[in-house]
Amino acid sequence: MKSQDTIVTLGIIGIILMIIIPVPLFMLDLLLSLNISIALLILLISIYNKEALEFSVFPSLLLVTTLFRLALNITTTRYILSQGNAGDVIEAFGNFVMGGNALVGFIVFIIIVIIQFMVITKGAERVSEVGARFTLDAMPGKQMAIDADLNSGTIDESEARERRKKIQMEADFYGAMDGASKFVKGDAIAGIIIALINIVAGLIMGMAFQGMPFQEAISRYTLLTVGDGLVSQIPALLISTGTGIVVTRAASESNLSSDVIKQLFNQPKVMFIVSGVLFFLGLTPLPFIPYFILSLIFAALGYNMLNAAKIQPEQEVQEEKEVDVEEIRKPENVLPLLQVDPIELEFGYGIIPLADKAQGGDLFDRLVMIRRQCALDMGIIVPMIRLRDNIQLDANEYIIKIKGIEISRGEILFDHYLAMNPGMAEGEISGVDTIEPAFGLPAKWIDDKEREKAEILGYTVVDPPSIISTHLTEVIKKFSHELLGRQEVKMLVDNLKESYPALVEEVIPNLLSLGDLQKVLSNLLKEGVPIRNLPTIIETLADYAVLTKDTDMLTEYVRQGLFRTITKTFIPSNEAKVITLDQNLEKIIVDSLQNTETGTYLSLDPQISQRFVASLGKEVEKLISIGEQPIILAPPGVRIYLKRFIDQISEDIIVLSYNEIDPKVKIQSVGMVST
């Protein structure tokens, strides 16, 4: 690496010295040939690069190559004017272009210079200028996009750093190209001026100092000037073309050659149209043979493309199969099979239109609304809901899975509506009897003709997507305590920390771990208590976590702190008919609490349990018969253990403590459970 650095350094110094120190004539031919070789190399690299930054040294290289050409121009001018000879390379180029006619050769040389100066160089300069301006203007937007991706977790810090570095390099590159393109423009102007100087000064030198006749002098020095100009301008033309290619390259995953072939010759229809137009032109007074040959060529291209288009899908399918087989054989690809989605909705093929936007389905939009609604109602972050079609299910059947286990299933009739009697509907409607999947209520499937009649009679009518989304929402709410893991709790805590940093820092992890907080929140969700008021929950934990680490007792303290939320959730009318416990039963429950290493639980005598269950069943039936939600009031110390015991009988019975009810609520005891 050090020797390479030395070679490049000595090369640049040698170019500068060559402007002052004469180069031997035999060495000049070698350097002129090297100039052409370097220009050709730069052009090919420009063609095969996929993006501009792969050739980031190009602006500096433009300066060096331009300086090299100017040094060669000075050296060749010195030989032309002093000796009337500039080596075999220049003389060969001059003879080839001039073809024995000095005027024709000079005109051809002028045309090449004009093309290089007016078209390629000027165009590349303009593109470089616009590219530099647009790149600089787009930098803030690109930086913001990177920050957004980083904040959302799409990319990590190292990738964000690389992308920022790439944006900065793009801005530097196009800014440097904008300046470097001026070198090429100046080189073209210098080439014209040097050519004029060589002819005029050479004619004077030949006639005045070497005694040549005018005809011989003009022929000799025109030949050398044209040869020198071509040897200089052809590399300049190649490098200018490379400059234009580099700055005009759009974003692509392949090189210029591949893009040209792929994008220019990929539509058989276009090839056949061009073939037909060329054949028609051949029938006009234009020459028939060239147009006919070109017409055949384009027709053959179109035919080959048609065959390739038929073969390519088969090859792609075969390649995909081979790739899939190879992927399956890899031992590390067993790991994705262990992934369990938190929530899955699987459905039969008949429900697919509801999830297909192309067919008017809005199930995806409803899933977004479910996640929003659960966040507002329960204060939880619902994980992404995975949708899958399952050919093993009936056409109109769907199942809901929580962590890979089927929790519930339902069935819908496509193009039908579900009509339910809320208790106030009058009259009968015709339809197919069924059970509403979310709440288990009796209902009927009706067609579109019966829909208006059912609504007039007072039935609640819902469409199939609403049935599925309602069912899914109820399942998520019911099992929200299982969906709330430590990762989700961390997201909630991090969000709270932005507004209440002191509160969060005091409690977590100083007083409670993330796992302890997760247990408390899960206990609340399991009984249907929203956790959206997270500041109050953390405040309560901050007060009582210094007294106990028992998450069950901490949950009871938090419930007391959320008494308004609990009251509003379970007693929305501010009046409640409840069931109370006999004092003897309360004492028996307190005495039956067993403390173990794994926690505290209620251990009632079997006979007492039977009498308790029987008495509780009678009182609950009374409340249900008058249309009231069964609510049991219990002392704060035993409430949670009583609830867990009652859940073994029914999960629909609400158990509250006296401290969890707003004092403004009117409580009426309509029954007492005893043993």
Image (tube, rainbow, N blue to C red):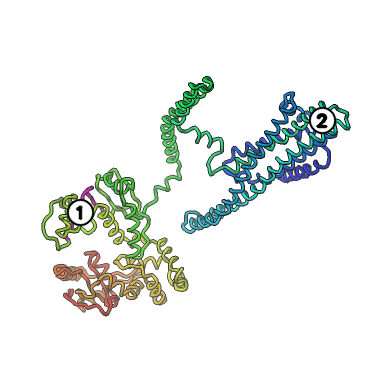
Residue 602 can be seen, yes or no = no
Q: Amino acid at mark 1?
A: Leu
Name the quadrant containing residue 573. bottom left
Eye-nearest disc, 2 or 1: 2
Q: Nearer the viewer, residue 630 or 209?
A: 209
Magenta span includes 414: yes
Give the residue drawn at x 35%, y 51%: 386
Dot placed on the residue nearer the N-terminal end, 2 or 1:
2
Q: Are marks 2 and 1 in contact (CB under 8 Å)?
A: no
Q: Nearer the viewer, residue 186 or 584?
A: 186
Q: x, y percentage for residue 609? A: 20, 69
Q: Which residues are magenta?
A: 409-421
| Residue 49 percent coordinates (x, y) | 59, 40
Task: Name the foreground residue: 587 vs 235.
Answer: 235
Residue type at mark 2?
Asn
Q: Which residue is mark 1?
A: 418
Q: Residue at x 25, y 44 (%)?
A: 395
Instruction: Please tell me how many numbered marks the rendered image carries.
Output: 2
Q: Is residue 224 magenta?
A: no
From the viewer's perspective, is 432 left or right of 181? left
The residue that disc 2 covers is: 85
Judge from the rendering whether residue 179 lies leftward or rightward of residue 475; answer left or right: right
Q: Secondary structure at mark 1?
A: strand
Q: Residue 82's x, y, as percent?
A: 85, 34
> Which mark identifies residue 385?
none
What's the distance in space between the residues labelled 2 and 1, CA to CA? 101 Å
Secondary structure under badge 2?
loop
Mark 1 surroundings within 10 Å by alpha-carbon count, few (fewer than 14), some (14 through 19), many (20 or more): many
Please identify the quadrant where the C terminus is shown: bottom left
Residue 402 sits in which quadrant? bottom left
Give the side of residue 22 with respect to residue 257, left or right. right
